[in-house]
Amino acid sequence: LSQELQRSQEENRRLKGALDEQEQTLQELGGKLSESKLKMEDIKEVNKALQGQVWLKDQDATNCKLCEKEFSISRRKHHCRNCGEIFCNSCSDNELPLPSSPKPVRVCDLCHALLLQRYSSGAV
């Protein structure tokens, strides 16, 4: 009876070790999956930029895309480098690195929130 107990305990230890190894492998694979998803999003952004993303012409915008305030001499137009739309300074005073640019560039509040959410969910 004691030999059977000892065998069961050894089997239990062996199974626990195998379980620990498999859990570690799952964690590593989960991390790699997150990295791959982020890389895919980066590739999609670059692809979107390379496909001739719509860059709104200055003369086509009379109001800020977000707050809808009219542009004037004191309220200047700024392009969001992510979506290409035109915003006032207060609706586009964020900077983030994009796959299409080596340094942080101006992005609108909408793209800023979207990109931050994407970066944080991917655990960059």
Image (spheres, grey):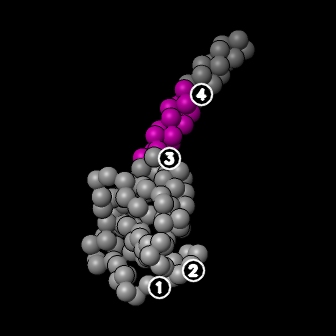
User: What's the residue at 47%, 58% (across, down)?
Assistant: 94
**Residue type at mark 3?**
Ala
**Of labels 4 and 3, the one closer to you:** 3
**Residue 112 within the magenta-colored segment of the rendering:** no
Which residue is situated farthest in the top direction here?
2
Mark closer to the chain start, 3 or 1 = 1
Residue at disc 1, secondary structure: loop
Q: On residue 123, which mark appears?
A: 3
Query: Label 4, on which residue?
Result: 16
**First in sequence: mark 2 vs mark 1:** 1
Mark 2 residue crowding within 10 angstroms, few (<14) / some (14–19) / many (20+): few
Contact check, label 2 and label 1, Cβ < 8 Å:
no
How far apart are the two marked residues, 3 and 2, measured between alpha carbons?
Answer: 34 Å
- How far apart are the alpha carbons under marks 2 and 1? 9 Å
Using the image as rendered, state which of residue 82 and residue 90 is in the foreground: 90
- Residue at numbered disc 2: 68
Q: Is residue 24 magenta?
A: yes
Mark 3–mark 1 Cα distance, whole angstroms, equals 38 Å
Q: Nearer the viewer, residue 23 or 66?
A: 66
What's the CA distance linking mark 4 and mark 3? 29 Å
Q: CA distance from mark 4 to mark 2?
A: 62 Å
Please state which amino acid type lies under the numbered disc 1: Thr
